[in-house]
Image (cartoon, rainbow, N blue to C red):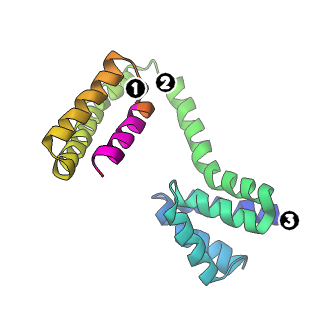
Amino acid sequence: MIYWQLFLAFLLPGVLGFGGGPASIPLVEHEVVDRYEWVTVDKFSEILAIGNSLPGPIATKLAGYIGYEVGGVLGAMVAIFANIAPTLILMIVLLSILLKYKDSPKVKRLTLYIRPAIAVLLGIMAYEFFATSYVGIGLWQTIFIAVCSWFLMEKLKVHPAFVIVVAFVYGGFFLA
């Protein structure tokens, strides 16, 4: 019975928490504090503080922690699955619709119109990153890191994750 309650407690915030993790925090709090009384308000605020200090989506961290506290490892798995199930199901449904109509001229035209918008958004993001790093570390360091990154990824075909690690190490040794 506890696993079913965990499933319901985290399914509802997953369905109704439109806007991501921060929007679902009050919903999770209502379920685990008021409805099921698994934790107190003070304990929930501590869990929330711990969750916010870790990387990743807050809703799944809350689900994992509270699920583990209430039902052990299986409880954590049930709570996390319940939290991500609505998004997972919706993505599968939308993907199946997209695959069904992928050869439609309207869908092809739509994707053709979306590509420039995505390119502009990525360009703006890259410019903002460049401007921020320029202010933080200076022009020559920024150019050096950008050129080295481009060379590693484009010419030597190094995976971007490794380039990021190399940039972190460079920053740790030469820019700290």
Residue 149, quarter of the rendered image = top left
Magenta-drawn stretch contains 104: no
Q: Residues within 10 Å of mark 3 (few under 14, many from 20)?
A: few
Position of 59 relative to 160 (above/below): below
Specify few, some or many for label 2: CA neighbours under 10 Å numbering under 14, 14-19, or 20 or more: few
Q: Amino acid at mark 1?
A: Val
Q: Position of residue 27 (x, y in %)?
A: 57, 70
Q: Tell me the CA gap for discs 3 and 2.
A: 42 Å
The quarter of the picture where residue 112 lies is top left
Q: Which residues are magenta?
A: 163-175
- Tell me the number on the disc at residue 107: 1
Q: Secondary structure at mark 2?
A: loop
Label 3 and label 1: CA atoms lie apart by 45 Å
Q: Quadrant of the rendered structure where residue 116 is?
A: top left
Pointer 2 with pointer 1, Cβ within 8 A: yes
What residue does disc 2 label? Answer: 101
Q: Position of residue 142 (x, y in %)?
A: 20, 40
